[in-house]
Amino acid sequence: NAGVTQTPKFQVLKTGQSMTLQCAQDMNHEYMSWYRQDPGMGLRLIHYSVGAGITDQGEVPNGYNVSRSTTEDFPLRLLSAAPSQTSVYFCASSQYSGNTIYFGEGSWLTVV
Amino acid sequence: GQQVMQIPQYQHVQEGEDFTTYCNSSTTLSNIQWYKQRPGGHPVFLIQLVKSGEVKKQKRLTFQFGEAKKNSSLHITATQTTDVGTYFCGENRDDKIIFGKGTRLHILP
């Protein structure tokens, strides 16, 4: 039981490049979400999903796309990376709304 | 919208001293969840409070939910170096959780 798995752990991008952060969970959780963490800003919700085929925007969705084609996977796409997207990204999942949230180990992204 | 404010943002304490962080909201909260994040790590769930005036304890940690369900606190008795990290609170509602900015705890030996 791996829990929530994120890849890659570290990535350096050039401005304008696109990339996808992968997130997979093996707990059959319905709810998945992406957060970014910046110094002094805490954890800010980017996008979330309440089940396969359903996604919604969080607090800071601009510049990011998500899809949820399966229960297990919830990739986060950066369409055209900007230095302002340099951050630590956490994927999270929970069995249902209001339940404990389990976080992945994080992906450190630097955009130069 | 959902928003919780956490104070203080930073706290330095001597090892062995007590520590308290507060989570405040202008609206009534349906619940409050607390998470701990060690330096370089990921947030880990500590506890959820749901009932007005609820108090829960985990060893040296005491969690309280206010009578009006607009505030919550986490109190650590006799801090240890293992308590270092950032403590986050958030309300889990409407299929998502919005976190406060967290309180970073530093322990001075």
Image (cartoon, coloured by chain):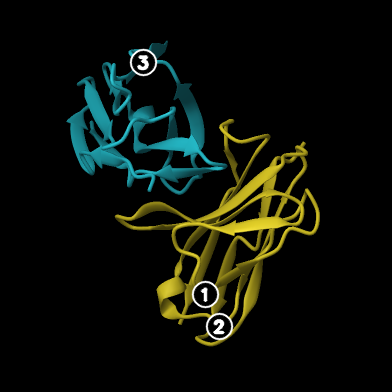
Chain colours: A yellow, B cyan
Callout in the foreground (2, 3): 3
Q: Give the quadrant of residue A3.
A: top right
Q: Give the quadrant of residue A73.
A: bottom right
User: CA–CA distance between discs 3 and 1?
Assistant: 39 Å
Say which residue appears at 72% left-offset and 39% top-offset. Answer: A29
Residue B6 locus on image (x, y percent): 27, 39
User: Can you see residue B59?
Assistant: no
Chain identifier of the residue bearing label 1 in the image: A
Q: Give the quadrant of residue B20.
A: top left
Mark 2 residue type: Ser
- Residue B102 placement, left or right of B95: left
Residue labelled with disc 3? B52
Q: In the rendered view of the protein, which quadrant contains the C terminus of chain A? A: bottom left
Residue labelled with disc 1? A63
Residue A89 locus on image (x, y percent): 52, 58
Residue farthest bottom in this picture: A16
Mark 2 or mark 1: which comes first in sequence? 1
Chain identifier of the residue bearing label 2 in the image: A
Q: Residues within 10 Å of mark 3 (few under 14, many from 20)?
A: some
